[in-house]
Image: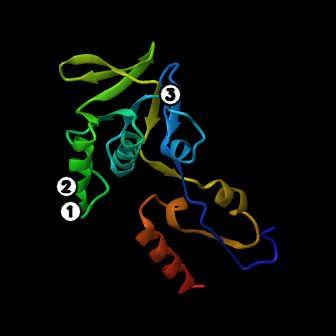
């Protein structure tokens, strides 16, 4: 289909990162938010970035028991800056809604309805009907790879080039459009 064009622009976005965790029912935020999976009454969220924290708040508002497991020493520590007012409000709402937050911890496995979490004080179990991974995204470059050796010049922009934010995607598009 790309034949007959001088330039092709690929903006296919990104995919959630996933890693295996034993026999757990592992989901990602998009699957939960789109209603593709039912999470049950207790949910463990791996990742305390913006996606993980906003999903936790949404699930808590739905009446779910939610625990965030974050590897860093605090939530919302990466991919900033987040507006200070939004940062403080989100933290306060998570606390108000009773979301449990475990920082400095890693998910190690899943057994008998519990996420096994490694902490500095040893392993603990977090009751969870479902585990949701919110650990970042990776570029979706499949279409770019399929087209790159054809006759047209193929360019990729936005998250398919490198995961960032909407401003980076807009800037990529502007820069590319000004050079074609």
Nearer the observer: mark 1 or 3; the answer is: 1
| Distance in Å between CA atoms under marks 1 and 3 | 36 Å
According to the picture, the residue beneath numbered tag 2 turns out to be 88
Nearer the observer: mark 2 or 3; the answer is: 2
The quarter of the image holding the C terminus is bottom right
Question: The residue tagged with tag 1: helix, strand or loop?
Answer: helix
Residue lying at 39% horizontally and 37% vertically, measured from the top left: 63
According to the picture, the residue beneath numbered tag 3 turns out to be 20
Q: Please, is residue 8 above or below residue 71 in the view?
A: below
Among numbered discs 1 and 3, the one appearing first in the sequence: 3
Cβ–Cβ below 8 Å for labels 1 and 2?
yes
| Distance in Å between CA atoms under marks 2 and 3 | 33 Å
Disc marking residue 85: 1
Residue lying at 38% horizontally and 35% vertically, measured from the top left: 46
Q: Please, is residue 96 above or below residue 161 in the view?
A: above
Q: Is residue 131 left or right of residue 120?
A: right
Question: The residue tagged with tag 3: helix, strand or loop?
Answer: loop
């Amino acid at each position: 289909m790309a034949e007959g064009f001088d330039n092709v622009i690929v903006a296919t976005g990104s995919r959630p990162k996933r890693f295996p965790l034993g026999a757990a029912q592992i989901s990602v935020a998009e699957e939960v938010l789109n209603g593709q999976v039912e999470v049950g009454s207790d949910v463990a969220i791996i990742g305390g970035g913006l996606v993980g924290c906003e999903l936790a708040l949404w699930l808590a508002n739905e009446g779910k028991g939610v625990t965030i497991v974050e590897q860093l020493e605090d939530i919302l520590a990466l991919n900033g800056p987040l507006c200070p007012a939004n940062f403080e409000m989100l933290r306060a709402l998570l606390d108000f809604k009773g979301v449990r937050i475990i920082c400095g911890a890693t998910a190690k496995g899943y057994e008998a309805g519990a996420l096994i979490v490694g902490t500095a004080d040893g392993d603990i179990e977090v009751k969870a009907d479902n585990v949701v991974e919110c650990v970042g995204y990776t570029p979706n470059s499949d279409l770019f790879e399929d087209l790159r050796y054809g006759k047209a010049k193929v360019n990729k922009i936005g998250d398919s080039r490198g995961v960032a934010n909407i401003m980076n995607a807009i800037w990529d598009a502007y820069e590319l459009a000004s050079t074609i």
